[in-house]
Amino acid sequence: MARLLQQIDETNRRDHWYLDESDDCHYLYEYTAGKGWRGGDTNQLIHNLQKKHGDGGYHYKAPAIARCARDLSAVLSAEWLDQATIVPIPPSKAKTDPAYDDRMVQVCRGIRAATPPDVRELVEQIASTDTFKGGQRKSPAELRQNYRIVENRLQNLRGIVGIFDDVLTTGSHFKAIKEMILERAPQARVIGLFVARRAIPNPFEELSEDDLLKL
């Protein structure tokens, strides 16, 4: 892997409830939970990347896609790309839905290399669901009920399969798709690639000793 990618490990895995030590996940940036688009450069980038048709500032979406592709191009080596198949995590809307958003596919296909990367929409969403905006996230088992493998895209998978998404939150989508791929291609090394991971701020981080004594 490229050396500028950061890895999920014992210091930050607790922020991603469904991940365990067997999961090999890498990310570029940190998205600060609860801060919205005002939470810094990464929060602004993700906010623009996730814009929908009709949203104010929708014209910022294409530059955000281009930046993510460019940043990934800078950290993924040609040697790694030659060994890998990249699988974008499908969005919440099915392909037949007018609101379908292929931003993850666009980012992956925008990665620049001497040889175009092997990008495959290997897993599809069966029916549209609401975009998560708070509340209880679905477990990997629940998510799997609404995913399907596209059979004609399974052939000749490369040795590494990189599951790609914009933000790593609980890890449930990654785990669901990892399990599905390993059932069909048990020889593959499946890893996670993310533009950012969601970092949950420590509520006590900015408190002084006097503040703590008052709690």
Image (spheres, rainbow, N blue to C red):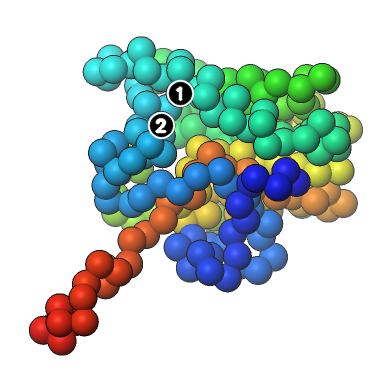
Visible in this render: residue 110?
Answer: yes
Q: CA distance from mark 2 to mark 1?
A: 6 Å
The residue depicted at 83 percent of the width and 48 percent of the height is 188
Visible in this render: residue 105?
Answer: no
Q: If the image is split into quadrants, where does the C terminus sit?
A: bottom left
Vertical comparison of 202 with 193: above or below: below
Question: Where is residue 49 shown, x and y percent of the image?
Answer: 42, 27
- Report the residue marked by disc 2: 45
Label 2–label 1 contact, CB within 8 A: yes
Which amino acid is tagged 2? Leu
- Report the residue marked by disc 1: 64
Judged left or right of residue 97, residue 184 is right
Residue 127 vs residue 179, the one in the foreground:
179
Query: Which residue in the rendered view is the most extreme toward the bottom?
Result: 213
Vertical comparison of 34 with 107: above or below: below
Question: Where is residue 24 shown, x and y percent of the image?
Answer: 68, 57
Vertical comparison of 38 with 17: above or below: above
How crowded is the residue under tag 1: few (<14 C-alpha within 10 Å), some, or many (20+)? many
Specify the quadrant of the image occupied by residue 42.
top left
The residue depicted at 71 percent of the width and 28 percent of the height is 120
The residue depicted at 25 percent of the width and 67 percent of the height is 206
The residue depicted at 11 percent of the width and 84 percent of the height is 214
Which amino acid is tagged 1? Ala
Q: Residue 206 bears which disc, if any?
A: none
Specify the quadrant of the image occupied by residue 193.
top right
Q: Earlier in the sequence, mark 2 or mark 1?
A: 2
SS label for mark 2: helix
SS label for mark 1: helix
Query: Which residue in the rendered view is the most extreme toward the left?
Result: 214
